[in-house]
Amino acid sequence: MQPAEFIARFQSPTTLSPQRDFPNLQITRQAAVLINLVPLLCPSDDGAPGSAEPMLHALFTRRSVHLKHHGGQISFPGGKHESLDPSLMHTAIRETHEEVGFVVREQNIVGSLSQYPTISGFSVTPYVAILESAPTVIIDHNEVSEFFYVPLKYLLNRDNYFSHTVTRNGKNYPIYFLPWQNTYIWGATAGMLINLCSATKNPSSVD
C-alpha cells in the first residue's frame, strides 16, 4: 500500500467501537505507542524484473523478556507517559527514540487511534507515523530484543486475524492474534491493529 492510499483510507476512529483487552479495567497510568509505517521495496504484483516499488510496512519490536509488563511480547515502540512529556504524542516519539534509536518528527504523524485499556492498568494511545525512508534502527537491548517489519497490506487484511475466547468474571471475550512467519502478534498489539483496520474501513483485502 502506498502512503497516499493509506492516508485517504485513514479516518478518525472516534465513532467506532474500539477493541480492548477487557471492559471495565482499572486504569492507573497513561501510555503511548507509535505505529511507524516505513516504505520498503517490494516486487510489484506482475513480478517483472526490476519492477520493485516502495510499499508501506509497519515496524514491530519484541520486548525483552525481563521487563515487568508484557515481557517477550510483540509490540510497537512506546511506553509510559512521563511528567516531563508535553503530550502523549511526545511520549510515543521519545520512547521510539529510546527503544529503536531513530527520531520521528511531529510532521510524520498522521493521526491516532482510540485509547486502548490493557489488563496491566495502562490506557495506551497509538499514534501513526509515515516515514519518508527506512530508518537506521539501533535497539536498546535493555528494552527490546529484536525488531522486524510486516507489510501494511497484510496487517489490514481482516482475514489474517484469528480470535480465541477467554472467560473473565463469568463473561466471554475475544483475544485476537495474527500469525506472521514464525511468531504471533497478539494481545493489545493485535487489538490495536484491529482498530487500525476499522479506522481505515478496510475490505477483506487491500490492493
Image (cartoon, grey):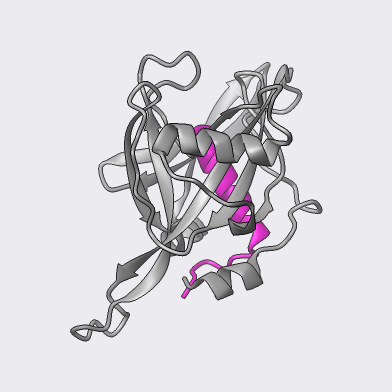
Q: Is residue 153 in view from this perspective?
A: yes
Residue nearer the viewer, 106 or 24: 106
From the top left corner, tell me how far across and down residue 169 is, in percent. 68, 16
Say if 128 sits above or below 188 in the image: below
Q: Which residue shows up at 66% across the image and 26% down it? A: 81
From the top left corner, tell me how far across and down residue 135 is, in percent. 38, 53
Residue nearer the viewer, 108 or 11: 108
From the top left corner, tell me how far across and down residue 203 is, in percent. 57, 68
State the extent of the magenta-drawn residues as a range: 187-207
Q: Residue furthest left?
A: 49
Main secondary structure found in the magenta portion: helix
Say if 22 sits above or below 107 in the image: above
In the image, taking residue 61 as reference, residue 15 lies left or right, namely right
From the top left corner, tell me how far across and down residue 134 is, in percent. 37, 58
In the image, taking residue 87 as reference, residue 128 lies left or right, namely left
In the image, taking residue 197 as reference, residue 40 lies left or right, namely left
Say if 117 sits above or below 126 in the image: above
Q: Which residue shows up at 33% across the image and 39% down it? A: 138
Q: Which residue shows up at 67% across the image and 58% down it? A: 199
Say if 4 sits above or below 32 in the image: below
